[in-house]
Image (tube, rainbow, N blue to C red):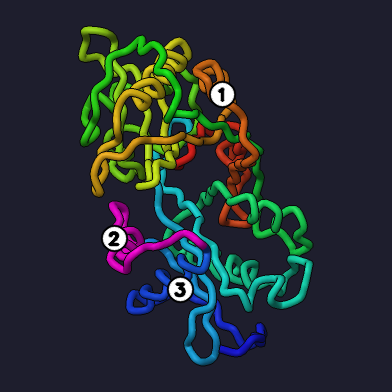
Amino acid sequence: MNTTVETDRLTYRPLREDELGVVVHLYDLAGWGPVTEQWVRSWLVHGPLGPALVMGIVDDRGEVLGMTTYGAVRVQTFDEEVLACRGRAAVLVPELRRSGRRVSAVDEHDPLYQLSLAARAHLRDRGWTLLYGIPHPTMQKRSDISVAPPLGRRDRCAIPGVRFEIAGVEPGPMPLDVTIGERPGEEYDRLWIRARVGLGIECAVLRDARGLAATRGNVFIECRLPGSDELVGYWVVDVTSSGKGRLMDYLAADEDALLPVALTASNWLRRHQIPTDEGPVTCRYVSCLAHERYSDALRGAGATDIDWPFAFSVSCIDENGPDRPEHDPRRWYVTTGD
């Protein structure tokens, strides 16, 4: 392709299913690969809540030069369960990035801004009213320098990142018993009911058995009272073949259970390999965001701060819709995998 792109000749539209193979290439460009087309289709087309909205930037030859995705997520907003959507995976070919276009400003002509603008009508057509995201730090920087008009009402809050060293650290105490879960069942429903009260959760991605069916991560570390079948908390951990781990989800029945769950799960990881599709893996470290609701427990169990600023944003898709309490990101319980 040419080294320059005429941005006024670009089209912003949903990608057809027969165009999704290009997502593999865009993932490689972003450094998120390798992924397969089969994985892309299982994630974007055959998800438990139906196909995602995949918005693409297409030139006049039909070549896809950028994308972003929006997927349905069940969320709890106070006493109501609703379908929201999460935005993720925004990527451009090098020629469309600000460096490639030799511009510094994120203004109304910016391709990703135009892509987000074009997506709004399609989001409303699907009946989604709430959009949330955990933007990559590079996307946060874009937002900080943007001079483009805001797209609807949007707010965000900063959340620090932390990391547990696992490999090479002498295991500590495990105050709770551990089992490795395979499929969330009714006990997760009971835990979710307890946690909403015990942790004062107002808004969050749904964490009952139905909501967790779409959880990303390959290991559920279930923590139970000693000698009991009672589930009092869990970690969901995703580990790469090289041993890099992320704490995707973390829940406990109440504030008193947060620290025992963190101690138990982190020290279990220091004693055991992680079962993966590629075989057992030794976890080197686990990183995650440290939401204020459980950050003290993470640090109390040995987590240390890292230079990776997370953020959580919430946006009302309907510009004319009412301003509601769930649009305040500070009223949400958030974990890395949300």
Q: Amino acid at mark 3?
A: Pro
| The image quarter in which residue 212 lies | top left
Q: Is residue 137 left or right of residue 182?
A: right
Q: Earlier in the sequence, mark 1 or mark 2?
A: 2
As drawn, the residue found furthest toward the front would be 168
Q: Is residue 301 above or below residue 111?
A: above
Q: Is residue 111 above or below residue 40?
A: below
Callouts 1 and 2 close, C-beta under 8 Å:
no
| The image quarter in which residue 253 lies | top left
Name the residue rendered at 32%, 23% in the picture. 271
Q: Which residue is mark 1?
A: 295
Per the rendered image, the range of residues in magenta is 31-51
Quarter the C terminus occupies: top left
Q: Which residue is mark 3?
A: 14
Residue 193 in view in this figure: no
Does the magenta run of residues contain 256? no
Does the magenta run of residues contain 35? yes
